[in-house]
Amino acid sequence: MILRWGIAVLLLMSCFSASAELCDASKKFCGYWPGSSGGSGTGAPTRGGKIKVNPAAVPVEKGTGLEMILFDGADFALVKGFGRVGAGISLSNSEDTFFGAPGIELPEDNLTRHDKQKKFNSQKFTLATAVKVYDNKKNGMKQFEANLGIMGKYNTLTKSTLGGAGVAGKMGFFTYGYGVYRDETRLDYGRYGLTDKPVTGFYVETASIGVFLHSVALDYAILRMVTNDVWTTKVLTASLLLKKTILTLATRTETSSRPAYNTSRKVLELKEDKNDIFLGAQFNVGKHWMLGLFYNYYTLHELALGVTVFF
């Protein structure tokens, strides 16, 4: 219900913004708004959030972008587009972010982390690259683009590097994307008097489709995390692009066997379906800067600050 009202408001506002565009993709780097080349990764409001689940979302347009999300430390991502090829690196994980897969952790760690407002820390680095494999150079409904991407995730806990691949692009006003990657995590049972630190391997696949109409972007993504069980996360995102502002509203439904944190009672409870909401606002400041404020990016009901510089 909240998202339906939010989309209605975004559509209404777009009717009063006939020239609502953040930048002209034919003249400068536009890799940070939802309608840019690279298609649909997820509806994540940051490019770093997209490339960690689908490497094909790395922008290939000429330009450089550096972004930071400030909360409980700083998460960094750097992307570089060369015209047909792009590369990106992220020094943070996507697990247990609003637009990423759930994190695997012990229940005690989950409870303590939420009580202390600590984001999930899997200590992984992601390096991704994408290439534009086809562009028919047409506009409107005749437009078709396809990008391919590959990535590697280095885990500082297990000292291993695992890979992934993806495809993304545009078909007319629609965007599409599919990505899959292998991953793993290590749990420490020392608090139970055990010396075991078993490694749990899994893979994550993400399928998404979106539509970009003038100044409104909609995106629907399904993430499947497969280990001994299958956890599914569905994210629906709506964004309004104004001349110097991006407003984002998203809902997330996670279906998994892991316990949910009750924010009012501050306890974990068994709940298969977990529903949540994300709010974001980003503002173009000057020629090369964008500042953002995000609510619930790390699924802690927190406020995080986003800083992006592109040139």
Image (cartoon, grey):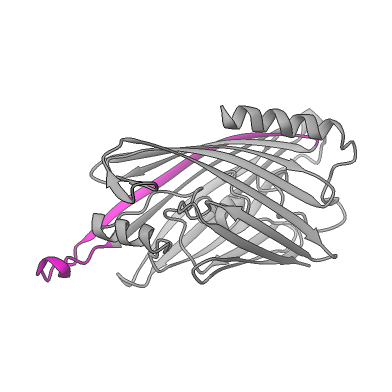
- Asked whether residue 280 appears in the rendered view, the answer is yes
Q: Which residue lies most toward the front here?
A: 265
Quarter holding the N terminus is: top right
Residue appearing at x 42%, y 58% in the figure: 163
Residue 160: percent from left, percent from top = 34, 68
Give, as a single range, the part of the protein colored magenta. Answer: 186-214
Q: Which residue is drawn at 29% across and 49% down?
A: 267
Quadrant including the C terminus = bottom right
Residue drawn at (30%, 69%) of the image: 158
Q: How many callouts does the rendering have?
A: 0
Q: Is residue 219 above or below residue 123?
A: above
Residue 145 vs 28, above or below: the answer is above
| Image location of residue 104, percent across then percent down | 31, 54
In the drawing, does residue 16 fall left or right of residue 98? right
User: In the rendered view, does 113 fall on the left or right side of 192?
Assistant: right
Q: Locate residue 285, reporting x and y percent.
A: 81, 63
